[in-house]
Amino acid sequence: MSIAAQTRSLPVPDGLEGERLDAALARMFGFSRTKAAELAAEGKVTLDGAVAGKSDRVTAGSWLEVEIPAPAAPVQIVAEAVEGMRIIHDDDHVVVIDKPVGVAAHPSPGWTGPTVIGGLAAAGYRISTSGAAERQGVVHRLDVGTSGIMVVAKSERAYTDLKRQFHDRVTEKKYNALVQGHPDPLSGTVDAPIGRHPSSDWKWAVTRDGKPSVTHYDLIEAYRAASLLDIKLETGRTHQIRVHMSALRHPCVGDLTYGADPTLAKRLGLTRQWLHAVSLGFEHPEDGRWVEFSSDYPEDLQHALDTIAAES
């Protein structure tokens, strides 16, 4: 039996007087603040009968009403071989893969392409059953348009331990990015909160009320039109590197979503952002020993790098 949408309403308590609507909604109904903001943006929240926006301020005693959509049908995992996905390491607890571009970490609504989880299932791997049904074993993700190293938990013990390590920033994630122009300074830190883009549901941006996000970058090589950077993340927000580099006005080459020059991407033969997860280190869930895995640049990124180096 399907579950229908429902409407819930409560008076705003005195303790939330003057709070933003999304913050009050999250406190009163148990949503995440992001989910609360999404419901407000969809016109599903009213304050004393009037449709309210996420940044509106609430008044104690006013009635806050929210329409909670029916839960979406569960996304099914399709076992499908993934061309170009390589297994770097495999043991009883973890499988480390080199994810190619064009592959999602796990199924999601609206995505019909290949997934890491589907590729592992097709290859006969049994992974952890922890987490949501469509993302079992996935403890971190890479964008569809980003290639490189990922780890997936095979045991329940590994899932719990790796989730803790990512949350506590024990892991070491290193990326290389080719960005337009030359950042000033050439090495530095971007400490800027990231939240939903104010005018796009599928983009992210530096926002005042976003989640804390910290990116460290160091110059590897400067070319005439671009710079190759070594990037380490303290946090793991969606699109974090892409958003932070764009905020510096040096977007990843080929990242048209975040303001990259399409003519440069075309000249280099790029159809995606030049961004690669080159290494990942973590404490092995079995015995705590430090392990680290790396990935070479795929052919399209290496070709672009060779081309821009030859032009310099």
Image (tube, rainbow, N blue to C red):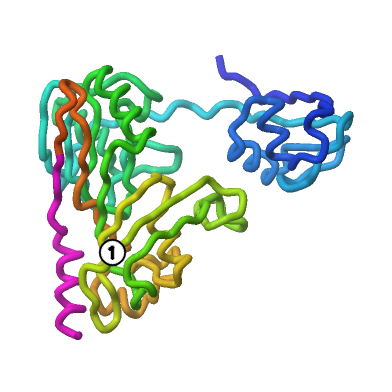
Q: In this view, does 199 lie above or below 115?
A: below
Q: Which residue lies furthest to the top in this view?
A: 1
Q: Is the magenta stretch mostly helix, strand or loop?
A: helix
Image point (26%, 79%), residue name: 267
Q: In this view, does 162 lie above or below 312?
A: above
Q: In this view, does 181 lie above or below 6?
A: below
Image point (29%, 76%), residue name: 226
Residue 273 quadrant: bottom left
Q: In this view, does 80 lie above or below 224?
A: above
Task: Looking at the picture, tell me which residue is in the foreground, 219 or 138.
Answer: 219
Q: Where is residue 5 in the image (x, y as percent from the top left)?
A: 66, 25
Task: Looking at the picture, tell me which residue is in the foreground, 138 or 222.
Answer: 222
Q: Where is residue 302 in the image (x, y as percent from the top left)?
A: 15, 66
Crowd around label 1: few <14 · some 14–19 · many ≥20 (10 Å): some
Residue 255 quadrant: bottom left
Residue 130 quadrant: top left
Q: What residue type is labelled 1?
A: Asp
Give the magenta range. Answer: 292-312
Image point (31%, 40%), residue name: 105
Q: What element does badge 1 sit on?
A: strand
Can you identify the residue that label 1 sits on?
Answer: 218
Task: Looking at the picture, tell me which residue is in the foreground, 82 or 164.
Answer: 164
In the shown orientation, is residue 109 left or right of residue 179? right
Q: Which quadrant: the C terminus?
A: bottom left
